[in-house]
Image (cartoon, grey):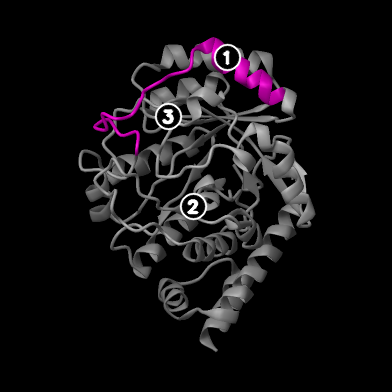
């Protein structure tokens, strides 16, 4: 009875105390999970209707200076075949995305020291000059406030920077040369500069407990990002966590539903990782309140080199070549494809 009561309270208030969230996570099962998903979907549809927003994902560099112990492109992995797209290749890919009907570009890469502010600013200005009505998102990691400021002035609209975990000691184990407080400061800087920001965490990290998920959920509630990226942890065989167990689709969709109820207006992707751990992962994500998909538009010869984890999907419904397939999948399940800007309804 308490679980159903707490779900209803969360649905009504879009908030829930720490101890109630923990109780819910510790006891929810069966029909109660279905009920939670139903409430999450109702909440999503209250603000976004049946729409699923599509963004063009361009993975433009797999060079990275960071040491993240779970990531296949971390600086210590000598087996990665590194690449970075030239300005011409990036602009050509943007044009291809436009031809396919996209109105949002998501430029994602490792923390590549080659892309200093001057280079990125020039690139951003050219993209915005060519596509002034399009939304431009960057996902290039931690930078200085000044860097974020000049990129915003150049025309970047959104910035994705997952916090990964809000538990300091676990963050430190995963990023031994980095600090959680730096990541949080970056998110706060981005928000104060007027970006639409994205944060988020991994589901199924080794030794993670329900009390840790509660901390992540409450952090997101306080931060109030415009977008929240949540996907299952998937190991990469060439990393220190290569033999760990992957996160489950069940736990991931539970977290998606809880985030949707805590942050009713947030943009919530059904991630590539979710589609990787389960063939119907994306659909289950939609049923839990997710409303964004990012097909991979990276030139096909580079896609397999951006290997963040084992088995990462980059063809079929995940890619430009499968765009019709993706749209059909969305529409035949009762949703609407929207390839416009799709701005978040979270207040700036």
**Magenta part of the protein: which range?**
72-98
Residue 64 pos. (x, y %) = 33, 28
Question: What residue does disc 2 label?
Answer: 230
Question: What residue does disc 1 label?
Answer: 125
Label 1, label 3: how far apart the Cα atoms are: 27 Å
Q: Quadrant of the N terminus?
A: bottom right
Q: Would residue 133 be seen by someone viewing this image from the given angle?
A: no
Q: Quadrant of residue 232?
A: bottom left
Q: Earlier in the sequence, mark 1 or mark 2?
A: 1
Of residues 144 and 288, the one drawn nearer to the viewer in this rendering: 288
Of residues 326 and 61, the one drawn nearer to the viewer in this rendering: 326
Q: Is residue 106 left or right of residue 75?
A: right
Q: Quadrant of residue 36?
A: bottom right
The number of callouts visible is 3
Nearest to viewer (mark 1 / mark 2): 2
Secondary element at tag 3: loop
Question: What residue does disc 3 label?
Answer: 305
Of residues 93 and 134, the one drawn nearer to the viewer in this rendering: 93
Vertical comparison of 258 with 199: above or below: below
Residue 124 pos. (x, y %) = 55, 18
Secondary element at tag 1: helix
Crowdedness of circle 3 by 10 Å Cα count: few (<14), some, many (20+)?
A: some
Q: Quadrant of the C terminus?
A: top right
């Amino acid at each position: 009875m308490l679980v159903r009561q707490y779900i209803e309270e969360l649905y009504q208030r879009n908030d829930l105390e720490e101890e109630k969230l923990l109780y819910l996570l510790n006891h929810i099962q069966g029909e109660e999970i279905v009920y939670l998903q139903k409430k999450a979907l109702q909440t999503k549809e209250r603000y976004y209707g049946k729409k699923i927003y599509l963004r063009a994902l361009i993975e433009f560099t797999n060079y990275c200076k960071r040491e993240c112990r779970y990531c296949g492109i971390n600086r210590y992995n000598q087996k990665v075949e590194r690449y970075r797209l030239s300005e011409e290749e990036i602009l050509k890919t943007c044009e291809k995305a436009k031809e396919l009907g996209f109105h949002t570009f998501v430029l994602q890469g490792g923390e590549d020291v080659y892309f200093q502010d001057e280079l990125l600013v020039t690139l951003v200005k050219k993209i915005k000059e060519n596509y002034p009505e399009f939304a431009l998102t960057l996902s290039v990691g931690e930078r200085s406030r000044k860097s974020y400021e000049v990129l915003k002035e150049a025309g970047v609209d959104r910035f994705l920077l997952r916090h990964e975990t809000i538990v300091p000691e676990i963050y430190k184990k995963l990023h031994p040369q980095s600090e959680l407080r730096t990541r949080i400061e970056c998110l706060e800087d981005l928000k104060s500069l007027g970006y639409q920001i994205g944060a988020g965490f991994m589901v199924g990290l080794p030794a993670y407990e329900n009390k840790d998920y509660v901390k992540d959920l409450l952090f997101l509630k306080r931060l109030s990002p415009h977008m929240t990226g949540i996907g299952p942890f998937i190991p990469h065989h060439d990393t220190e966590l290569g033999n760990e167990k992957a996160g489950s689709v069940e736990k991931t969709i539970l977290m998606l539903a809880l985030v949707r109820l805590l942050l009713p207006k947030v943009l919530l992707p059904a991630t590539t990782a979710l589609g990787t751990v389960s063939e119907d992962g994306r659909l289950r994500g939609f049923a839990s309140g997710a409303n964004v998909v990012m097909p991979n538009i990276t030139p096909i010869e580079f896609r397999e080199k951006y290997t963040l984890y084992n088995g990462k999907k980059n063809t079929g419904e995940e890619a430009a070549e499968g765009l019709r397939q993706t749209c059909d999948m969305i529409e035949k399940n009762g949703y609407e494809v929207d390839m416009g800007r799709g701005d978040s309804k979270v207040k700036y």
